[in-house]
Image (spheres, rainbow, N blue to C red):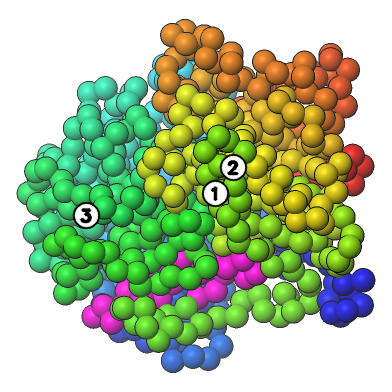
Amino acid sequence: MAEERTGKRRLAPEDIYEIALVSDAQISPDGQRVAFVRTVLDRERNDYRSSIWLVDVAGGEPVRFTTADARDSFPRWSPRGDRLAFLSNRSGKDQVWLISLGGGEAQQLTRFPEPVTHFAWSPDGTTLAVVTKAETAEPPEKEPEPETDVVRITRIRYRSDGTPGFLDEKRSHIWCVPVDGGRPWQVTSGDFDESWPAWSPSGHEIAFVSNRTPDREYNTVSEIWAVRASGGEPRPVATGDAAYFFKPVWSPDGTVLAFTGHREPFAGSSRNHQLWAVAAGGGEPASLTSALDRSVEDEVLTDTAASSKPGPIWAPDGRWIYTQVSDQGNVHLYRIPAGGGEPQLVVGGRRRVVDFSLSADGSLIACTVSEPLNPCDVIVCSADGSGERRLTRVNEEFFATVELSEPEEVWLPSASEDRRPIHAWIMKPIGFREGVRYPLVLEIHGGPHAMYGNVYFHEFQLLAAQGYAVLYTNPRGSQGYGQQFLSCTRGAWGEADMPDLMGAVDAVIERGYIDPSRLGVTGGSYGGFMTNWVIGHTDRFKAAVTQRCVSNLASFYGTSDIGFHFGEHEIGGTPWEQPELYRRLSPLTYAPQMKTPLLILHSEQDYRCPIEQAEQLYVWLKKLGRTVEFVRFPDESHGLSRSGKPKHRVERLQHILRWFAEYL
Ligand SMILES: CSCC[C@H](NC(C)=O)C(=O)N[C@@H](C)C(=O)N[C@@H](CO)C(=O)O
């Protein structure tokens, strides 16, 4: 037994309570310290708690800096480095709080009646640009009682998965808040949603992201605008119907704006995000990464991470722009020459650079990184990536007590005609012994334009701990392998990528330690679509678990928050233009062929892949007399496996293990 050999125990679903998550590593302007967020799952309250921690770049134990029993996040240093602003829900909704590095309690800075979702320090440190849906700076004396609980809907975008779910008529705008007293003022207004404020180096202007096109109700455009910090009419920087731009950042001399994105808004996540530059006065943007053929966003999926919002950072000497790049299961930090030229790898390796920040002189970088056997830690290195040092060992003690399976990174031939090698990872079961044949679980990722990669994945480790070999792959349609590979699944969901999955399964079986009569399959979202698709097209799998799945593309079009644009682009037309294509590519069409015992897991408030997708599949299979079970998670959204209530996350994992234990 593994336990006897190593003295370590096997991982359990509840171990999610033992893993602390660190994120948002923010190095101080003087490069002396790193502030970061430490998030833990609170078993008693069935909730999350997060606090801001500090660690010296020179080394030493990290210290907890904010101590409230709350969710503190998004720490940002003042330009002088003498205080930190951060978001906290201490007063109910997320607001900006300030804490001095010299000591003393945190003080609440903003009191907007709506949450603050993002903010940025002005270069002189006197003002914060804040994003909120609030229409006044102070809460009303008394919250008005709603006249009715009936929801009247007039827009096509009326709900969005996650919080708040149903969208109201309020719009996200930029406000300026003086840090040391004075009244906040509203900078932008109108029927637009603004985000990502970025101050010009002079402090006179704020660039931001918005969709101000006349057809914004129906399109997916995302433009870059700029406005005087004092307010007034915004001016266009990189705008128009072909703009899909995000995360603006000014050059240090204020003459150029860089940002991420691409030029086909309707194509959304199916296009590489590139890094662009445009004259700050506006004009035609030029791509700085067109030759890279990779996305400059973090495209990797995991169930064990806290979220942060990294964007490109311009080096203070103006020569480089630092950005994440998703490449073959890794997320690396690159620096791109601002004037054009070869991108340089700064932080590479088999891992994900989750977020990063630069010291004021640009000489030091702090990052949060995730690796296959370690969910997260903070590292620091020089501007060119040299001299890397780990500043935290957040989960070292816990992982010393449990046995993990080290994923083997391989390339396996597709079963398609081209036999194209597909990137994959194989995990042997804990306690693996030569000569024994093990059951195999195939894990299929969602998106489809995302990727599995070199990160810790609790669900996979748990399956390995239960004695399953685990296979996960990046089939056609995945991010990280170039635009051509990314586009393969358009109008061919299931058809293009199933041969890649099956080829990989066969290649693992050939290794001799898999029992081919004990194959399991699972996946979430598009991975749930593929789970349904696979069991409708082969009987080789003995048990399946479909999670937050898509089963009927025509109803997905009308019920998903992204159905009318994402669904339409991915399938290649509307359901009324292409009814036969929608029928052909819907897993439900193949329900009569589904024989594999199926567990359906779905969240009741999933507005990305609404629960009707699961309900249809369940009733069809039940009526067909198949072995099928349906587990519904109340008050959860699409993100259940990653950000759901801790108890539900544990229960979800237990159901997966139960099903495979019974049928595999
Ligand atoms: C601009 S629309 C993007 C759609 C989005 N795609 C990605 C890459 O996330 C999406 O939500 N797709 C779902 C159908 C899906 O498969 N989601 C995956 C990946 O996030 C999931 O695991 O939930």
For mark 2, what is the residue? Answer: 414
Lateral position of residue 156 relative to residue 599, left or right? left
- Residue 365 belongs to magenta span: yes
- Quarter of the image where one finds residue 517: top right
Q: Earlier in the sequence, mark 1 or mark 2?
A: 2
SS under mark 2: loop
Please report the residue visible at 15 percent of the width from the left and 46 percent of the height from the top: 285
Sequence-wise, the earlier of marks 2 and 3 is 3
Q: Is residue 157 left or right of residue 529?
A: left
Q: Which secondary structure, mark 3?
A: loop
Q: Position of residue 258 (x, y in %)?
A: 21, 55
User: Who's the residue at 35% across and 69% down the image?
Assistant: 345
Residue bounds of the magenta highlight: 353-378
Amino acid identity at mark 3: Leu
- Disc 2: residue Cβ within 8 A of ligand 1's nearest atom: no
At x 79%, y 77%, the residue is 401
Helix, strand or loop status at disc 1: strand
Tag 1: amino acid: Pro
The disc placed on residue 421 is 1
Quarter of the view holding residue 552: top right
The residue identified by callout 3 is: 288
- Residue type at numbered disc 2: Ser
Which of the two marks, 1 or 3, is nearer to us in this view?
1
Task: Measure the alpha-carbon separation of dots 2 and 3.
Answer: 33 Å
| Above or below, comparing residue 180 to residue 658 in the picture | below
